[in-house]
Image (cartoon, rainbow, N blue to C red):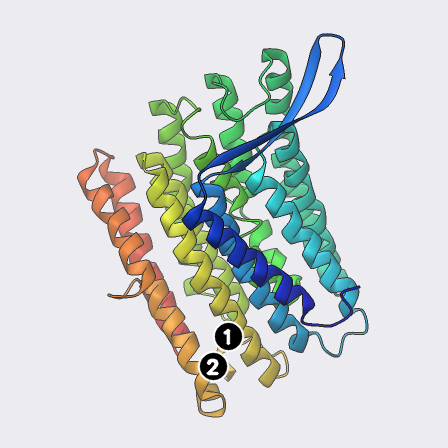
Amino acid sequence: MFKSKNQFTILLFCMSAMFTYSYLFMPCSIVEFNVLSLYSYDLTMSILFDKVSLLFGIVVSLIASMVFLFSSNYMIEDKNMYRFNWILLSFVISMYILIFSGSLLVILIGWDGLGITSFVLIIYYEGNEALGSGFQTFLVNRFGDIFIILSFILFLFMGIFQLWDKISMLITIVLSLAALTKSAQYPFSSWLPAAMAAPTPVSALVHSSTLVTAGIYLIIRMNCLMQLSNSVKSMLLLFGAVTCFLGGAAALFEYDLKKIIALSTLSQLGLMVYTLGLGYPNLALFHLFTHALFKALLFLSAGSFLMCTFSCQDIRYMGSISSTMPFCGVILNICIMCLMGLPFLSAFYSKHAILDKMLMSNVNFFSFLIMLMATLFTVMYSIRLVK
């Protein structure tokens, strides 16, 4: 079963088409079923098919199908390619569980599934560097899992099991800390550049629509239920602004192609968290989708260049690569212009809307100045990548 190298691509692309049809023509629905009945206690689980989950499912399925198509050529000389494909599919399934679950217990299962499968994928290339990077990623994410397990214990004490039940202020803070850890916000951001030890197809999936966006999705999903007080919003503004600034500043002094793209992901995640702190979850979701699409394409273009340069990732030796691969060079430059937010590209609409909301808000001048400098850094390190 699934011995052909392109069958995973076909499967995920068909799922993307199915989610698109459901989004356009079917009403929002909740599928609920009883898992356990014990005396007077019933444990129910539910699946959400609303606009947010279906849109996220479309993006994840589309990107995953293209990643599997790319990996069929990128990993063609790997003798364990089928094992790699199954691990990668498990990673995508864990994200599906997180996206469509309406039960907090099942969200915890998907959350842990992402952590375990990401660790296995990062250490896929055997070696001390990959093993160290994998354990660093695993331990930092485990630290964040402490918060979500603690929140689940609080849910049990309060008798809350579904996403539509109102939650308290304490649970809001704990869930926010768990989400910030999973989405690599400072000071929990060290694992994201280390995850570059994984194969390039994994990086394209991790940095676009799966692992790093899980925390953002959790806050967006529970935003209408969480009591986002001024203190929680200030915490999100602080973490987001500092992460966006430090990610952009670090990318200015990096020469590794994949690490520059990884640090740009860190910067854009900070921008999403900052938008959540401003109180605009739908705008953060919009930027998440635009960023996921062009960041996946950026990683796949970079992977094509690495195949041509025999895995040389130093941008100082890649100045004339566009003359050898002109089509990939054009795609890479379009993605870079999208990252900069140039007019009439997808990120232009989301980024400028965020900046507009920031200028109209009552945030303090220090936070405003940091975000303007981070935006300038984005343009500066993006220009370094133009081929």
Q: Which residue is mark 1?
A: 301
User: In the rendered structure, which amino acid carries the disc numbered 2?
Assistant: Cys
Residue 259 visible in the current orientation = yes
Closer to us: 212 or 39: 39
42 displayed left or right of 288: right
10 Å neighbourhood of mark 2: few (<14), some, or many (≥20)?
Answer: many
Q: Residue at x 56, y 67 (%)?
A: 66
**From what the image shows, is residue 155 above or below residue 19?**
above
- The residues tagged by marks 1 and 2 sit, at their Cα atoms, a distance apart of 6 Å
Q: Residue at x 47, y 54 (%)?
A: 20
Q: Are marks 1 and 2 in contact (CB under 8 Å)?
A: yes
- Count of marks overlaid on the render: 2
Q: Residue at x 48, y 87 (%)?
A: 321
**From what the image shows, is residue 6 above or below residue 163?**
below
Closer to us: 352 or 263: 352
User: In the rendered structure, which amino acid carries the disc numbered 1?
Assistant: Ser
Numbered tag placed on residue 328 in the rendering = 2
**From what the image shows, is residue 196 above or below residue 229?**
below
Q: Position of residue 270 (x, y in %)?
A: 41, 46
- Quadrant into which the N terminus falls: bottom right
Numbered tag placed on residue 342 in the rendering = none
Q: Residue furthest bottom?
A: 323
* Comes first in the chain, label 1 or label 2: 1
Q: Residue furthest top?
A: 40
